[in-house]
Every structure is written in structure tokens, then in C-alpha cells.
């Protein structure tokens, strides 16, 4: 159970939020004159380091892990989760993402939508050598620069900038040490004074140097995340050596270690702000395999799962990596955490993800070290610019292009030559080519703009391999691996639509393709019996129908092949995901997409990721999982989720819990890649929509993230309610 300390800081976190640093502009103005005439990369580094040396340093009451972003305020009452409104997706801001004029129609029509990239730093290196070791690496690389190289001065400036940033952050940690020492000197409680002296020593030690104790390791984990706040990485892996060493020496108590983890978890929660609910993510990774392929779960994995369940916070998102050697008790403990939390952890399959990363050129050793970020974006931890997620592609709209319903995107609307399903597929491929080229040109514009940032994102360049060695920025191709990830949305809708066309037009010949197009133009008006037949009687993806599943695989394979004919700005290759993300693109794309042949009306949501369209998986959860497992997951190395809504009564008994454990294992052994659950029934969701004040903390899985149900807007709530509610074994 939570200690009084962790319960108190959790309560404070639930009543706190970020309002922004009101002193930031003044701090930056202090150094502005000194920066004039310096190379831009040095200007940026010195400005960042100056801010770190001048920003407010705050240690909150009772904290054992310290480091608080300026502008953090606490209110007397628990903050109600923010209700997010509808979004309108248009062409990206040219200052952020310049696109050539010829691709603008694809953005304006809702064919493409932008996203943000995620970054995970090299925690293993930080824990091995600290920021002081990074400075040593910088100087060692500087010593090997060739003065005769025309690029030498640029490389020299880049390395100098990285050192400035590293030293600025070490000074910030020293400032926290100074603050803790000052507080300890005035603290009347001897026990708290002793804690503050230890906090000071920890901050003086790390992240400058490698941690030695478990307390230092937890502080190092937080400071590393504090430096680049995106994803905490494989926390159980880099904390375990200090834990194991101290436990063996008898200098650490398990319950105190758990309390430290509870403090760390709350810091992760604080980093996104209590009321956000949806917009910010910090996905933490547990389990998995070691570089040699052995199972990596350990005692800290268990502690982390216990803390996740007992805290019951929606952040950090926790993902458990499963492999064929994962001990069943670890998986069971993860499901037990779900029993308490209802939203975390989620689960992913090493057997598929490692293979998919290796398939696109990542070494096996590096692929085995992947971790999760954002909603569920896979990143080769601290070694890659995955481009996760570059943007989203609206698959159902591609079919509307092929059917001549989107003349602004594909002018040829003559369907007279489409006399077979094969001929329709050729038109679909032609439309895919047009969309892929638009996505490619858009990526070139965005990534070229990002590369112009002095130092190519200095923070990322400092803590991602191999930017120092290559003297190249993180957004400029300096990372060991470079990819560009586009997520395809509405796969199931495209599959179901093609199945409907194949059966109605080419097999039964009950209507012509032109007649079907007219029906879609009328948004199914006057054709409700036909629409109901499509919805109820025709095959749909997610029901273990071999022909339908094969068509889904063909769609993914074809679009992947088309994208891989192109090379991204930073090199590497394009990779696909299916995640709707925090942008909720299954809702957003649905709003701007006209009627589709699967019975979907204009404006209705499309499928949220790799699973079936809402309510179409009628053959039971096993059939759904088998359909998904049949897909070519080796072509989906990042950003793939499968939302499954289960009867909440399953978690009320040990037998039900074991059934969920078996469900996960069986799906992953069959070839599935990811699973995440919502254990809330339709009646409760409907009640929460009608009376949100009674269900403020009801958590659900949305796309790749969890959120309070009452923080979601109406049509997103309706989409979650419409998802099939399964019972294991049906």
C-alpha cells in the first residue's frame, strides 16, 4: 500500500498544474546582448545553459526525488480533468512544416494530418558515465577533428554547444543540491533534515556521475527525464543494478525502494500536469529482453507494477514488454495492476517488435533495447530518430479517391474500365501512389525545416547516440538509426469497404459500381436496407474470416512497399504504424470523410487502430485477436495498438484474472503485437456521459493512451461506447 508520504504527494499532484515560467523571458533577456555575433548554435546553447542556471529551483514538502518545472502551482481542490474540444485539421503551419503547393489539397481534404515526433534518450549511457562522461566524449571527439576538413568549424561549434548544454544542466543539479542543503540547515525535524542532506548529496552526485545507490538511481532517472521530458525508457532495467547491489549488501529495504518509486511515479505524473488527461504522454517501459535475448524482468519490474496499480494515476503510462520467456507471475502481476488501475499497463510483444525493427535494419542487440513513447510509439532507446509520428494517412479516403469521389485529389473519375475487382485494386494502388508521394514531399519539407534548428535539437543531440560521434544533430541525421513513421488510419474500414464492393458489385452483381458511388454521394440516404445488410451480413475484418484478413494484410503490404520506394530526408526508410494517437485521428479523419462502402455514413469515426471497426467484431474476442495476429506485423515496427473492451467482472475473481493473462499470452504466441484493455461496460460509460460529476476518475483506453472518460468530447465518448464489449471465451 502507499506510504503516507506518497499518498500526500499524490494528493498534492492531483491539485497542481503548470502555468508556465513567468520569469523565462526576463532570464533570456539577461544574456541576449552577450549572444550577438556568435554562431547560432552557440547562441542557442548559451541561452539554454543560462536559463538552467537561473530558473527557479523548487523542492516541495516531503519530496525524496526533486526537480520541478518552474510555474508549478497547487490549488486547494482536486482539479477536474480538462474537457477537450473538437479539432479542425488543415494544412500545417508553414513556419513549422512547409509543404509544396501541389500537396496542399491532400491536407485540406483530410487525407494527411500532422503529428509530433517523440524522443527517448540514452539512459544506459547516462547511468554508466553521467553527463560528465558525455563531456569527456565530446572532448575526445573534438580531439579527432581534422582542421583541414571544410566542415571542421561547424563540427567544432556543434561540439562546443553540446558541452555548454551539458555543463548548464550539471549546474542545475548542483543548484538543487545547494537548495536542499539550505533547507536542511533550517529544518527543525531531524529526520526530514537528514533526508534533505541525502537529497543534496544525490543531486551533487547525479546526473553528473553514474549513480551508486538506489536513491541516487531514482534521482538520476528523474533528472535525465527532466532534461528531455518525453519517455522514461526501460526504468526497471537501468534501476535494477543499484537495487540488486544494495539489497545484496543489506543497505536497502524493499519497502523504502517502493516508496522511492512511488515518489518517482508522481514526478512523472507532475511532468504532464494533473488536468491534462489527454494531451501529454510519458510512456514508461518494463520487462522485455536483454541484449542477448534472455528475459529481462526482475525484482524492480515487480515493484514498478505494484506502484502502478496502487497509485492509480493515468500517467505515467506503463507498458509491459512480453516475450516467450516472460515469467507468468510477472504477467499476472501486471494484470493485477489493471485490477487496481483499470488503465495501465498495456502490453506489447517482443517477438514481433524486435523482428520488425530488425527487418528495417536495426541490429538485433539494439532492437532488443526498444522502449515505448507517446501513445505507443516504439523507439530504439536512445539510438534513433524514429520519426514517430510524422503524420497520419486516411485510408478510407484513398478508396474514395479511387472511386472518383475526391476529384480534387484524383481527377480521373471514369469508372467505365473498372470491370473487375482486380481493376479496382489497380485504381486503389494508383491512388496510394499519389498519397504516398504527397506524404513523402510533406515529410521532406517538415524534416528539412527541423534540420535547420541550430544543433538539430541540442538536447536530443547530446543524449542520443551517435550524434556526438557524427558531429551531427538529432534532427539532421546524427542518430544511429533514422526513420520516418506515417500511421495509416482506418485499415478495417478500407478492408470492409473492399469486401462489400467485391461481393455486391463483382460477385453478386446486385448493383453497378456507378450505382454504389451514387449511393455514397447520397450518404446512403434512401438505401438503409442495403446499408444494414452491409453492416450485419457481409464479412468484416476482426472475425477470423480468412479472405478478409488476407485483404487487410495485402493493404498493409502494398502501402508499405509504395512508401519504401521513397527515401526520407534524414535517410533510413519510411515505416508504417496504425496508431490514431493523442490526436484521435480515427475521430478527426472520420469527421471529414464522406460515406464509405462499409456502411459508414459521412462524418462517423473510422477504426481506431489495428482492430475492427466499432461493433463489427461480432464473432468474439478470440476471432478478433486471431484476425489481428494474422497481419504482417514485421511491416509495422512502431505505433500499433489494439483496444479491447472486456467485461469488468473478469477482474473481480482470480479465475477471471487468469483468463485475461491467458488471453494476452495466447494472442502474443499467435503473432499479435500489442494489447490494451478497457474494463468498463457500456452501461457505466453511458451513465458517465449523462452524469460526468459522478465519474470524474473513470479511466478508459482511447487510442494509444488512457484518459478520464469525462475529459473526452462527445463523439469520442460515443465511439468508445460503440466498441464491442467482449467476454473472454465467447
Image (cartoon, grey):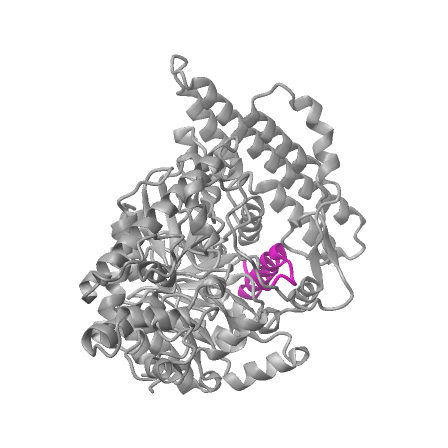
Q: Position of residue 502 (x, y in %)?
A: 23, 72
Residue 610 drawn above or below residue 284: below
Residue at 20% over, 66% down: 421
Q: Position of residue 630 (x, y in %)?
A: 25, 68
Residue 684 drawn above or below residue 644: below
Q: Is residue 105 visible?
A: yes
Residue at 45% over, 55% down: 109
* Quarter of the rendering occupied by the C terminus: bottom left
Residue 35 drawn above or below residue 234: above
Q: Which residues are magenta?
A: 252-278
Q: Is residue 357 visible?
A: no
Q: Is residue 703 left or right of residue 169?
A: left
Residue 633 sits in quarter: bottom left
Foreground of the two, 3 or 347: 347
Q: Position of residue 383 (x, y in %)?
A: 39, 43
Q: Is residue 436 magenta?
A: no
Predominant SS of the magenta segment? helix
Amino acid at each position: 500500500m502507499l506510504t503516507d508520504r506518497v499518498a500526500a504527494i499524490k494528493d498534492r499532484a492531483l491539485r497542481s498544474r503548470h502555468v508556465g515560467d513567468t520569469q523565462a523571458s526576463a532570464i533570456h533577456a539577461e544574456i541576449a546582448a552577450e549572444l550577438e555575433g556568435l554562431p547560432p548554435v552557440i547562441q542557442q546553447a548559451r541561452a539554454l545553459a543560462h536559463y538552467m542556471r537561473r530558473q527557479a529551483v523548487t523542492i516541495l514538502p516531503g519530496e525524496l526525488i526533486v526537480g520541478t518545472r518552474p510555474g508549478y502551482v497547487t490549488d486547494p481542490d482536486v482539479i477536474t480533468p480538462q474537457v477537450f474540444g473538437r479539432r479542425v485539421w488543415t494544412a500545417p503551419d508553414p513556419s513549422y512544416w512547409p509543404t509544396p503547393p501541389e500537396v496542399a489539397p491532400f491536407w485540406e481534404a483530410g487525407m494527411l494530418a500532422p503529428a509530433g515526433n517523440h524522443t527517448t534518450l540514452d539512459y544506459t549511457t547516462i547511468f554508466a558515465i553521467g553527463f560528465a562522461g558525455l563531456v569527456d566524449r565530446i572532448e575526445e571527439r573534438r580531439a579527432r577533428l581534422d582542421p583541414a576538413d571544410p566542415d571542421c568549424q561547424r563540427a567544432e561549434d556543434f561540439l562546443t554547444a553540446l558541452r555548454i548544454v551539458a555543463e548548464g544542466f550539471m549546474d542545475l543539479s548542483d543548484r538543487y543540491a545547494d537548495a536542499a542543503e539550505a533547507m536542511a540547515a533550517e529544518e527543525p525535524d531531524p529526520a526530514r533534515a537528514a533526508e534533505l542532506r541525502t537529497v543534496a548529496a544525490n543531486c551533487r552526485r547525479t546526473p553528473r556521475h553514474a549513480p551508486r545507490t538506489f536513491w541516487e538511481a531514482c534521482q538520476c532517472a528523474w533528472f535525465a527525464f527532466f532534461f528531455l521530458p518525453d519517455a522514461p525508457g526501460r526504468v526497471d532495467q537501468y534501476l535494477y543494478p543499484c537495487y540488486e547491489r544494495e539489497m545484496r549488501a543489506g543497505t536497502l529495504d524493499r519497502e523504502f525502494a517502493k516508496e522511492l518509486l512511488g515518489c518517482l511515479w508522481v514526478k512523472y505524473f507532475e511532468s504532464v500536469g494533473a488536468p491534462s488527461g489527454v494531451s501529454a504522454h510519458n510512456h514508461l517501459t518494463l520487462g522485455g529482453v536483454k541484449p542477448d535475448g534472455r528475459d529481462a524482468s526482475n525484482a524492480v519490474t515487480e515493484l514498478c507494477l505494484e506502484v502502478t496499480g496502487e497509485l492509480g494515476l493515468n500517467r505515467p503510462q506503463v507498458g509491459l514488454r512480453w516475450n516467450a520467456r516472460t515469467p507468468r507471475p510477472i504477467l499476472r502481476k501486471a494484470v493485477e495492476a489493471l485490477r487496481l488501475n483499470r488503465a495501465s499497463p498495456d502490453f506489447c510483444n517482443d517477438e514481433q517488435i524486435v523482428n520488425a525493427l530488425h527487418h528495417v535494419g536495426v541490429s538485433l542487440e539494439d532492437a532488443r533495447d526498444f522502449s515505448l513513447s507517446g501513445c505507443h510509439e516504439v523507439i530504439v532507446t536512445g539510438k534513433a530518430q524514429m520519426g514517430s509520428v510524422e503524420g497520419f494517412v486516411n485510408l478510407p479516403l484513398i478508396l474514395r479517391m479511387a472511386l472518383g469521389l475526391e476529384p480534387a485529389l484524383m481527377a480521373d473519375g471514369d469508372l467505365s474500365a473498372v470491370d473487375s475487382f482486380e481493376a479496382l485494386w489497380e485504381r486503389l494502388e494508383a491512388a496510394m501512389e499519389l498519397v504516398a508521394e504527397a506524404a513523402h514531399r510533406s515529410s521532406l519539407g517538415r524534416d528539412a525545416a527541423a534540420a535547420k534548428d541550430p544543433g538539430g535539437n541540442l538536447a536530443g543531440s547530446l543524449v542520443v547516440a551517435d550524434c556526438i560521434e557524427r558531429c551531427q544533430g538529432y534532427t539532421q541525421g546524427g542518430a544511429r538509426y533514422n526513420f520516418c513513421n506515417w500511421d495509416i488510419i482506418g485499415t478495417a474500414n478500407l478492408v470492409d469497404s473492399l469486401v462489400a464492393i467485391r461481393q455486391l458489385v463483382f460477385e453478386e452483381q446486385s448493383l453497378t459500381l456507378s450505382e454504389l458511388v451514387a449511393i455514397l454521394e447520397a450518404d446512403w440516404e434512401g438505401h438503409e436496407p442495403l446499408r444494414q445488410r452491409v453492416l450485419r451480413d457481409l464479412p468484416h475484418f476482426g472475425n477470423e474470416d480468412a479472405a478478409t484478413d488476407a485483404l487487410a494484410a495485402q493493404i498493409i503490404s502494398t502501402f508499405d512497399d509504395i512508401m519504401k520506394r521513397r527515401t526520407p530526408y534524414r535517410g533510413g526508410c519510411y515505416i508504417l504504424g496504425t496508431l490514431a494517437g493523442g490526436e484521435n485521428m480515427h475521430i478527426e479523419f472520420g469527421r471529414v470523410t464522406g460515406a464509405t462502402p462499409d456502411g459508414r455514413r459521412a462524418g462517423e469515426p473510422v477504426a481506431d487502430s489495428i482492430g475492427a471497426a466499432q461493433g463489427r467484431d461480432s464473432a468474439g474476442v478470440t476471432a478478433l485477436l486471431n484476425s489481428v495476429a494474422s497481419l504482417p506485423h514485421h511491416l509495422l515496427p512502431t505505433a500499433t495498438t489494439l483496444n479491447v473492451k472486456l467485461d469488468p467482472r473478469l477482474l473481480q475473481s482470480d479465475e477471471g484474472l487468469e483468463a485475461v493473462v491467458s488471453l494476452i499470452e495466447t494472442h502474443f504466441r499467435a503473432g499479435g503485437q500489442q494489447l490494451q484493455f478497457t474494463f468498463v461496460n457500456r452501461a457505466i460509460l453511458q451513465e458517465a456521459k449523462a452524469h460526468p460529476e459522478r465519474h470524474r476518475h473513470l479511466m478508459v483506453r482511447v487510442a494509444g493512451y488512457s484518459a478520464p472518460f469525462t475529459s473526452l468530447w462527445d463523439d469520442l465518448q460515443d465511439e468508445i461506447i460503440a466498441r464491442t464489449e467482449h467476454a473472454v471465451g465467447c
